[in-house]
Image: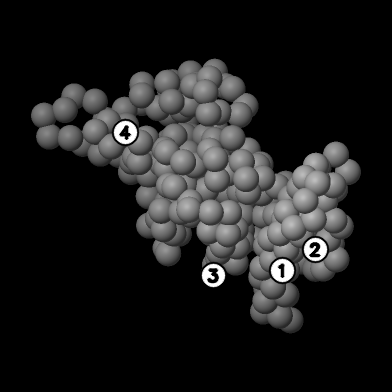
Amino acid sequence: MSAESVTPAILFTLTPEAARVMGCLIEKEITLPDYYPMTLNALVTACNQTTNRDPIVRYDERTVLRALESMKTHGYVFEVNIVGGRTLKYRHNLKGKLPGLERPHMALLCMLMLRGSQTAGELRQRTERLFEFPDMPSVENALAELIGYNEGPLVQCIPAGPGQRVAQFMHLLCGEVAGAAAATLSAHAPAAPVVEDSSDADWRAKMEAEITLLKAQVSRLQTLIGAVK
């Protein structure tokens, strides 16, 4: 399969620094609307938070400004001039560049950009301030929609395997991570994750949810393969 067949929807690949800045813009837009759009200083502080971030970073103004400028060039960030204000502010344009994203999708992408790959359960817990998912199926449905995004996958499911009890999810805004494609292609017959729950019903529910998400990913890949034949 050609590399193009799994190209993410985003045409401009974010650097890790740009992804952290984008995640902060989305987060603060939702949680601190009175302080959004954000100044450069506020973004530096947000990027360097020691809570709700993984990894912990120590960006300086130049690093954040470089990330902003690169995203601004490609239309993912806009400068905002507030009447009477003395400082430039910034807002994201992710929904403009990727039409159809709703609040649940934005919350998941935001948390994936701020904290790296995570399980569906972790995502439900950590997105509470951004969007309150009523149950696990609602998280899984939103993840499946991001995997099956019309213009190309925005999220990838990494099946459970050695050293990993359950499936994890990662965003693709920084491009595909080495090894992820191979994991995706093995999704036709995903291995059963090793879980700690003693309940067969809980185990079965987790397996069914994981298989559903992997099927959505495989379906998307099959569509892309058909398009390039």
Q: Residue at x 35, y 41 (%)?
A: 30
Give the Cα separation between the discs numbered 3 and 1: 16 Å
Give the secondary structure at mark 3: loop
Q: Residues within 10 Å of mark 2 (few under 14, many from 20)?
A: many
Q: Earlier in the sequence, mark 3 or mark 2?
A: 3
Q: Which mark, residue 150?
A: 3
Q: CA distance from mark 2 to mark 4?
A: 39 Å
Q: Secondary structure at mark 1?
A: helix
From mark 1 to mark 2, how far is it between C-alphas? Answer: 7 Å
Residue receiving disc 4: 32
The residue located at (61%, 54%) in the rendering is 155
* Residue at the image position 71 percent from the left and 59 percent from the top: 205
x, y (%) of residue 19?
A: 53, 39
Circle 4: is it few (<14), some (14-19), or many (20+) Cα within 10 Å? few
Q: CA distance from mark 4 to mark 1?
A: 37 Å
Other residues around mark 3 within 10 Å, as few (<14) / some (14–19) / many (≥20): some
Residue of label 2: 187
Residue 80 in picture, x, y percent from top left: 25, 39
Q: Nearer the viewer, residue 17 or 23?
A: 23
